[in-house]
Image (cartoon, grey):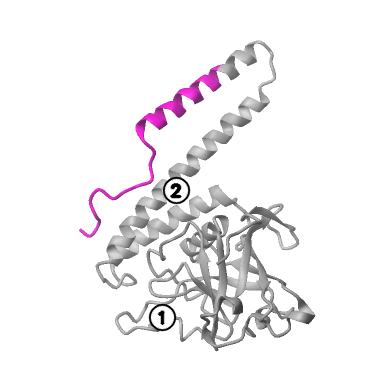
């Protein structure tokens, strides 16, 4: 059996859980007492409901973390996970648990692609059109359906939620690659990929094998170069993990502008990079229908350290 023994989890210690349960019990007793006295307990009821929701999210996160450790352990054996029955069963469990966690933490909507990430860019004075267009730019990424690649989507939501700093620092002929610094330090636990969502032009994928947390925008169709069987000879099914697609920043020329960074491939001069100053998570205001307005769910701090 490939599963490791004593897999670490993110669970809290026993004393902390006991303190929370004791506090919850006292709060519920106050509500009962207040109801008998005819007092208004709306605020306390909301506090209890929020605490219960937080516990539910925490339990879901613990389950994902534990399954993730199991999946990483199997990947480390070198087995071809895309055809191995145990690997397929375990990655499926991880994907199911991740879908649940996404809906609990970021909202549950009717539309298939409800989650978006807005990137606030800063072009430096080395960009050729700086004098005419200035420093500001924006890209919006629509994340892929969680029915297809839930862990890749969840991982990028977590990158955006805990974003610190980053920049586009690679100007290649086929991709624009970015450094991503956040609380997400590890690469993906497995190469999650769906043939229904290939690496077409203007899609966004995770760089490297194993993939992430660095990411790239494809500026050409990379379905072959980054799809199944690419960039290695051991596994004919392995592909780069994919995140979503750019839905704002193409028609207005922002993506093309990044491609004018002076130099090719990895740029050693940081003054030539295009900085990613902030990330914002956007979700539908309503149920996610086609004409629904998108609103900000969370954003990274305004004042960020330099890359």
- Does the segment drawn in magenta span residue 266? no
Residue 270 at x, y = what percent? 56, 76
Q: Decide: is 12 above or below 151.
A: above
Residue positioned 31% across, 49% down in the render: 8
Which type of secondary structure does the marked residue at label 2 adopt? helix
Determine which residue is flagged by label 1: 228
Above or below — where is 155 with respect to 125?
Answer: above
Q: Farthest residue in the left direction?
A: 1
**Where is residue 90 shown, x and y percent of the image?**
34, 59
Give the answer, above or below, for where 307 lies relative to 177. above
Residue 33, image quadrant: top right
Q: Describe the element under mark 1 as helix, strand or loop.
A: loop
> Is tag 1's residue or tag 2's residue first in the polypeptide sequence?
2
| Location of residue 265 in the rendering, given as x and y in whole percent from the top left corner | 51, 85
Report the residue marked by disc 2.
61
* Front in this rendered view, residue 99 or 276: 276
Please give left or right for residue 37 compared with residue 178 in the image.
Answer: right
Residue in front for this viewpoint, 241 or 217: 217
| Residue under the point 60% across and 59% down | 304
Residue 8 lies left or right of residue 216; in this view the side is: left
Q: Residue at x 34, y 71 (%)?
A: 82
In the rendered image, residue 17 lying in the magenta stretch gets the answer yes
Q: Nearer the viewer, residue 237 or 180?
A: 180
Let me know if residue 214 appears in the view.
yes
Which part of the image, by quadrant, shows the N terminus? Answer: bottom left
Span of residues in magenta: 1-29
């Amino acid at each position: 059996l490939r599963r490791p023994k004593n897999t670490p989890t993110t669970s809290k210690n026993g004393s902390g859980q006991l303190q929370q349960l004791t506090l919850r019990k006292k709060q519920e007793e106050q509500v009962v007492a207040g109801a008998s006295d005819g007092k208004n307990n709306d605020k306390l009821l909301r506090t209890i409901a929020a605490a219960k929701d937080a516990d539910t999210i925490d339990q879901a996160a613990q389950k994902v973390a534990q399954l993730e450790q199991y999946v990483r352990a199997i990947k480390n054996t070198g087995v071809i996970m895309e055809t191995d029955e145990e690997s397929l069963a375990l990655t499926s469990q991880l994907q199911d648990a991740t879908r649940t966690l996404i809906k609990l933490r970021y909202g549950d909507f009717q539309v298939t692609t409800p989650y978006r990430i807005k990137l606030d860019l800063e072009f430096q004075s080395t960009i050729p059109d700086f004098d005419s267009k200035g420093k500001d730019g924006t890209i919006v990424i629509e994340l892929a359906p969680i029915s297809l690649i839930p862990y890749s989507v969840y991982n990028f939501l977590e990158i955006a939620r805990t974003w610190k700093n980053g920049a586009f620092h690679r100007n290649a002929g086929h991709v624009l690659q970015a450094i991503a610094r956040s609380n997400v330090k590890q690469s993906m636990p497995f190469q999650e990929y769906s043939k229904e969502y290939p690496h077409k032009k203007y899609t966004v994928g995770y760089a490297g094998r194993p993939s992430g947390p660095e990411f790239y925008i494809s500026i050409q169709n990379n379905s072959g170069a980054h799809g199944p069987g690419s960039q290695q000879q051991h596994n004919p099914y392995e592909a780069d993990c994919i995140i979503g697609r750019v839905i704002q920043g193409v028609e207005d020329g922002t993506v093309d502008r990044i491609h004018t960074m002076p130099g090719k491939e990895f740029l050693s001069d940081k003054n030539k990079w295009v900085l990613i100053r902030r990330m914002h998570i956007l979700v539908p205001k309503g149920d996610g229908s086609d004409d629904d307005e998108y609103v900000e769910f969370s954003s990274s701090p305004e004042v960020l350290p330099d890359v």
